[in-house]
């Protein structure tokens, strides 16, 4: 996304980011200033029309930052695309008159998944009967009382992700490297209580755009959508209370806990629908380039679908 032009910003705002080093970090900072203006315009308009007192503002995010484009997750490990905390743990806040005075400005320490927003918002609106098949958990009472964690936290486990297609870097006969997608070796992560298990995750380290940190050998990345430089993945087990930055893999020290979390992932695997991956389609890129949006492009043509399957860059295992 292009950064806001300097002419859109005041001298005071430009002075605020004068010491921000790196073009990507400066672009990121400019975008945040423009976001502040947008939120300011929204809140002032709501207040002008007398709607602010009945409005709940929620800020959330979808994933961790990408260091190549100014993102900054340190001291958390990893980044966008990876299942370490730097890729999945993000900031959020709620604001509005319905938030009790005693908890305003405080932090919630409980686990919360993005799917929890739907039942939480419905609960805030006093919707008494929630659909039984919702994936999320109502966290409204926990957010507005902030009683002791973890005893009062309604979420006891969090499934980060399960991907039945696993990317693996392989060597070609000519000596070059490529990425193949395979089935049967799921890439997944789950947290139960204080324990977090990662299966078949790539080795990534700690990325700080402000300085070059020393990284473990083989733990790098080419972009925020490609595996680490090392060709092998690893299983990890962390206690996030004792080790919030995921520095020490203790999977060999606690095999029973690791097995228990693996069994829980297997239970989720048994309940998910099959994924139908159809590989890379040049038409998708053409539509994106023409419209600037990700829109439907697949034709309901059996021949076209069969062709898509034939070029899918994965092997069945």
Image: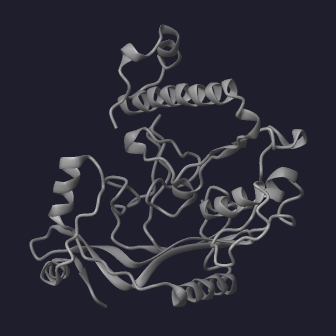
Up the image or down, 99 lies above or below 234; here it is above
Residue depicted at 33% across the width and 32% down the height = 2
Residue depicted at 76% across the width and 71% down the height = 129
- Figure quadrant of the C terminus: bottom left
* Residue 114 seen in the figure: yes
Q: In the drawing, does residue 95 fall left or right of residue 208?
A: right
Q: In the drawing, does residue 193 fall left or right of residue 163?
A: right
Residue 212's x, y, as percent?
43, 40
Residue 201's x, y, as percent?
46, 70
The furthest residue to the front? 49
The tally of labels here is: 0
- Figure quadrant of the N terminus: top left
Residue depicted at 46% across the width and 61% down the height = 82
In terms of depth relative to the viewer, which is nearer, 40 or 258?
40
In terms of depth relative to the viewer, which is nearer, 206 or 112?
112
Residue depicted at 67% across the width and 24% down the height = 48
Up the image or down, 96 lies above or below 306; here it is above
- Colour basis: one colour
Q: In the drawing, does residue 266 fall left or right of residue 238?
A: left
Q: Give residue 139's quadrant in the image.
A: bottom right
Residue 179's x, y, as percent?
25, 70
């Amino acid at each position: 996304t292009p950064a806001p032009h300097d002419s859109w910003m005041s001298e005071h705002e430009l002075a605020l980011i004068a010491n921000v080093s790196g073009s990507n970090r400066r672009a990121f900072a400019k975008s945040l200033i423009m976001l502040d203006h947008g939120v300011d315009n929204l809140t002032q308009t709501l207040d002008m029309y007398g709607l602010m007192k009945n409005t709940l503002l929620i800020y959330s995010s979808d994933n961790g930052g990408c260091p190549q484009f100014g993102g900054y997750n340190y001291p958390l490990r990893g980044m966008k695309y990876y299942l370490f905390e730097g890729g999945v743990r993000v900031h959020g806040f709620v604001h509005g008159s319905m938030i009790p005075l005693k908890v305003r400005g405080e932090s919630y320490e409980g686990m919360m998944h993005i799917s929890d927003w739907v039942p939480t918002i419905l609960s805030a609106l006093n919707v008494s009967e929630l659909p039984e098949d919702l994936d999320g958990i109502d966290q409204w009472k926990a957010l507005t009382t902030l009683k002791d964690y973890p005893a009062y936290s309604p979420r006891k486990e969090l499934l980060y992700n399960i991907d039945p297609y696993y990317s693996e870097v392989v060597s070609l006969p000519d000596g070059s490297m490529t990425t193949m997608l395979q089935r049967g070796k799921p890439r997944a992560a789950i947290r139960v209580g204080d324990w977090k298990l990662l299966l078949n995750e790539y080795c990534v380290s700690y990325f700080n755009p402000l300085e070059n940190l020393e990284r473990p050998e083989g733990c790098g990345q080419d972009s925020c959508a490609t595996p680490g430089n090392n060709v092998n993945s690893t299983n990890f087990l962390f206690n996030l209370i004792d080790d919030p930055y995921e520095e020490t893999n203790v999977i060999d020290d606690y095999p029973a806990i690791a097995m228990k979390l693996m069994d829980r992932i297997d239970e989720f695997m048994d309940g998910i629908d099959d994924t139908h991956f159809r590989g890379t389609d040049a038409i998708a890129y053409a539509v994106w380039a023409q419209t600037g949006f990700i829109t439907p492009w697949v034709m309901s043509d059996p021949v076209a679908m069969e062709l898509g399957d034939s070029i899918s860059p994965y092997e069945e295992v």
